[in-house]
Image (cartoon, grey):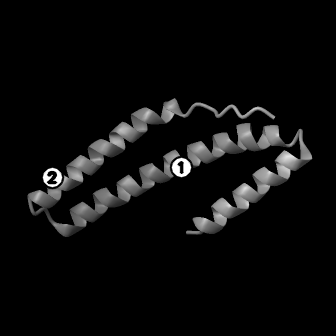
Amino acid sequence: MENHNPSHLENIPRLNRIAGQIAGIKKMIEEGRYCPEIISQLRAVRSAVKAVESNILHKHLQHCVAQSFANPEERDKKLEELKTLFDRFND
């Protein structure tokens, strides 16, 4: 089975915003801003990163995993890959 990874380019604008948020947080720290303000921005970044993660996982399930079901050996490999992924990032 050929492996054609789906494009995730639609996430680039969101990642650019996240990079801007991170730069803003660094500036807040350099300026000595109030801790809860910094924490609030950190939570916003965490939420944005989770959204990107969710988008990529969704596409992986729809594209890569779904295609693997045509081949039982490939399907088992993808399912094991998912199990390992979820075990590693069980948060």
Q: How many discs appear? A: 2
Q: Which residue is mark 1?
A: 53
Quadrant in the picture for the C terminus: bottom right
Q: Amino acid at mark 2?
A: Lys
Q: Amino acid at mark 1?
A: Glu
Q: Which residue is at the front of the view, 39 or 90?
A: 90
**Label 2 to label 1: alpha-carbon separation:** 26 Å
- Quadrant position of residue 56: top right
Is residue 56 depicted above or below 9 in this figure?
below
For the point 8% across and 58% down, which residue is it?
31
Choose between 55 and 9: the one closer to the eye.
9
For the point 82% across and 42% down, the residue is 68
Q: Position of residue 69 (x, y in %)?
A: 86, 43
* Residue 38 in the figure: left or right of residue 84: left
* Extreme residue toward the left, this view: 31
The label number, if any, that marks residue 2 in the structure image: none
- The residue positioned 50% from the left and 30% from the top of the image is 9
Check disc 2 and report the residue beneath it: 27
Taking the image as shown, residue 80 lies to the left or right of residue 55, namely right
> Which residue sits at x=24%, y=67%?
36
Residue 1 appears at what percent x and percent y?
Answer: 81, 35
